[in-house]
Amino acid sequence: MRIRKAELEAVTGKPSQYPEEGITEIALAGRSNVGKSSLINTLINRNNFARTSGQPGKTQTINFYNINGDFRIVDLPGYGYAKVSVAERQKWANMIEKYLTSRQSLKEVVLLLDIRHEPGEHDKMMYDWIKSFGYKGYIIATKADKISKGQWQKYVSIIKKKLEVENTSLIIPFSASKKLNLEKVWETIESMLEMHEEKISLDKTQTEDE
């Protein structure tokens, strides 16, 4: 995909401050410091577009990134960071839940996991939630440069088994620093957008027929 324009459209934790509904949104979920911001920066080829941090749990807002005026990538707060209070973790969980359950523009939720580590309880809960709402269940397995390519399948199989993923092709090993599988991630995003456009066209046709 050719990136003509990319902008940080909103940084918020309140539904009243979300951007106007309308264009397709693809949300990124994952544990703190899993690499959501790095993925966004790599996708649009700008080093400091999405703010990254070496401090897990720092992102406490929902960040809406508008790409070409055509769709948004939505960076959700990282979950599962132990060194914050229970009250603060619950606040973030509520923020995520409000967005995921109320946003009409949301068409897909992608789970990011560190390929090197077996998915934990929070990852399983998030993936089950994603599937329960009818999303496809795409997983981007980050930091794939930290293990040899020959080991990818082994770690992908662990993720597949732990999360009960239906199809291995839904799990994409990825590295932001080495840009490994960048093209495949873009192809996946483009397929999500195309599927949504086809659904809109089909719904419109059915409405006209009625």
Image: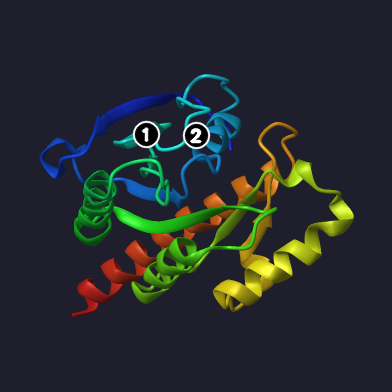
Please report the residue visible at 36 percent of the width from the left and 43 percent of the height from the top: 77
**For the view shown, which residue lies furthest in the left direction?**
16
Q: Secondary structure at mark 2?
A: helix
Q: How crowded is the residue under tag 1: few (<14 C-alpha within 10 Å), some, or many (20+)?
A: many
| Identity of the residue drawn at 49% across and 27% down | 52
Q: Which mark is residue 59?
A: 1
Q: Name the amino acid type tagged 2.
A: Ser
Q: CA distance from mark 2 to mark 1?
A: 10 Å
Give the x, y percent position of residue 29.
43, 51
Q: Quadrant of residue 135?
A: bottom left
User: Which numbered disc flags the more N-terminal residue, 2 or 1?
Assistant: 2
Q: Are marks 2 and 1 in contact (CB under 8 Å)?
A: yes
Residue 152 is situated, as x and y percent measured from the top left of the image, at 79, 58
Q: Residue at x 55, y 73 (%)?
A: 163
| Drawn side of residue 77 relative to residue 20, left or right | right
Q: Position of residue 109 (x, y in %)?
A: 42, 57
